[in-house]
Image (tube, rainbow, N blue to C red):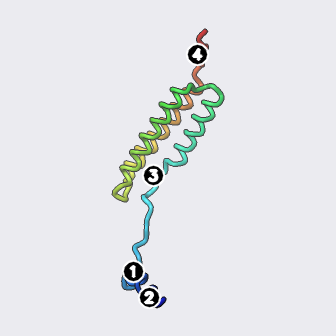
Amino acid sequence: MPAITIVALLLAPQIWDGGGRAEPVTAPPASGIGPILGDTARRVRDGRRSGQITRPQARSLRRDAAVIEDLSDRYAVDGVVSDSEAAELRSRAEAQRGIVDAQRLAPTPPAPR
């Protein structure tokens, strides 16, 4: 086969969209809890490294933060996070951060003998 035929066969299946403008890809609206959850994750990690938080406590705290993130994703699925939804997410994230701080400040139980 001539080379021009091969090039034509390779280019034939492509579909031209008429040169119209593509729809812009928009990210879901931010609920504003990313920095709070990031700070909380850092506090859990630091508490775990310092021995203030046990491994099961850290696992539970991370699981709770994941629930808040999942809720945020569910609220943003329709493309709009209402003010009340954003306020709920912020209050949950702030409460989670407070729980982490309380766990870190609680006296550590003595090691079993």
Relative to residue 27, is residue 41 depicted above or below? above
The answer to which of marks 2 and 3 sits earlier in the sequence is 2
Q: Are dots 2 and 4 in contact, CB under 8 Å? A: no
Q: Which residue is mark 2?
A: 1
- Marks 3 and 4: which is nearer the front? 4
Relative to residue 29, is residue 68 depicted above or below? above
Q: In screen coordinates, is 76 left or right of 111?
A: left
Label drawn at residue 14: 1
Task: Report the Cα–Cα distance between label 1 and label 4.
Answer: 67 Å
Task: Report the Cα–Cα distance between label 2 and label 4.
Answer: 81 Å
Mark 4 is surrounded, within 10 Å at the Cα level, by few (under 14), some (14 to 19) or many (20 or more) other residues, namely few
Q: Which residue is mark 3?
A: 31
Relative to residue 10, is residue 68 depicted above or below? above
Percent coordinates x, y for residue 104 in the rendering: 59, 27
Residue at 61% in and 9% down = 113
For residue 20, what is the image quadrant?
bottom left
Instruction: Identify the amino acid type marked 3.
Output: Ser
Between 85 and 71, the one nearer to me in the picture: 71
Q: Which residue is mark 4?
A: 109
Between 19 and 106, the one nearer to me in the picture: 19
The answer to which of marks 2 and 4 sits earlier in the sequence is 2
The answer to which of marks 1 and 4 sits earlier in the sequence is 1
Percent coordinates x, y for residue 58 in the rendering: 53, 30
Task: Report the Cα–Cα distance between label 3 and label 1.
Answer: 40 Å
SS for tag 2?
A: loop
